[in-house]
Amino acid sequence: MWQAENVRARLLELYPHSTVEILGMTTRGDQILDRTLSKVGGKGLFVKELEVAMQQGEADLAVHSLKDVPMELPQGFELAAILEREDPRDAFVSNDYTSLADLPAGAIVGTSSLRRQALIAARYPQLVIQPLRGNLDTRLAKLDRGEYAAIILAAAGLKRLGMAERIRSVIAPEDSLPAPGQGAMAIEILSVRKDLQDLLAPLNHIDTERAVRAERQLSRTFGGSCQVPLAAFATVEKDAMRLRAMVATPDGKRIAHADIQGAADSPEALGVQIAKVLESQDASAILAACKVE
């Protein structure tokens, strides 16, 4: 809802004489809280109902957290704008400790992400990692009840909802590489709505768009989903892009990683290139092992 309100405010700034209404909806991803996304259908659970609303004419556009958007959109849909990225890093949240390194052996860490699970397990095998689902308030309440010594969340979500004070420390990309699209918001529309393409164009942030296109291309190459511990993070500096990526088994015992640079105006090509570097490190075998598990 914060994301929808944010886009509504931006549209009213651009088009002050327009009317922008919010159609609140609950998706399957919001409803299923007792299992990890990787076991109940993945990222598409957060967008399907919104796409149906657009098809039925109940809504003109949908606002998503980009990391929840499947790498392949259904036919007839497209992303009309990618908004400027908020902090893409993971956040360490705890009432008693300041960082992962401070946690004692056997401490329970909560996360809903196989990517985070793999990265934590690789660096801190002495920690116990347990699933954590629910909205932000639910997750923080579980931490406050003592069910976890710490939880790992997206820094962007905490900052957007005015909860930045709950962040004990942000985790550098070198230690926890973000998920493709993390921290970015996307606006989805029906492909036939050329009128909306023009209206939404001013909201598109070109550097963010290029970065996430590279990240999503890598994920698309490996069939990225919630079942795959995969990370990809691109940064743009003028005409150059740096793209870092990682695939791993959930236990963190097998990891392939790569770090390349290239032209910012060829993001998909860079995504394909880094996929080949990962493939040279047996990435397909790592991902095949994940699916067996």
Image: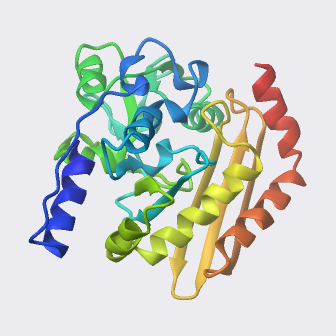
In this view, the residue in front, 150 or 45, is 45
> Is 160 situated left or right of 27 in this image?
left
In this view, the residue in front, 201 or 97, is 201
Residue name at image x 81 percent, y 54 percent = 278
The answer to whether residue 159 of the structure is visible from this angle is no
> Is 147 situated left or right of 116 in this image?
left
Query: In the figure, residue 154 lies in which quadrant?
Result: top left
Q: Quadrant of the C terminus?
A: top right
Query: In the figure, residue 194 lies in which quadrant?
Result: bottom left
Q: Quadrant of the N terminus?
A: top left
In this view, the residue in front, 174 or 194, is 194
Q: Residue furthest bottom?
A: 239
Tell me residue 268's x, y (percent). 69, 68
The answer to whether residue 178 of the structure is visible from this angle is yes
Tell me residue 28's x, y (percent). 42, 23
Q: How many marks?
A: 0
Q: How is the image coloured?
A: rainbow
The image shows residue 293, relative to residue 151, as above or below, that is above
The image shows residue 232, relative to residue 122, as above or below, that is below
Residue name at image x 44 percent, y 41 percent = 51
Tell me residue 265's x, y (percent). 62, 82
> Is 179 situated left or right of 289 in this image?
left
Residue name at image x 56 percent, y 52 percent = 76
Residue name at image x 59 percent, y 31 percent = 114
Tell me residue 40's x, y (percent). 56, 19
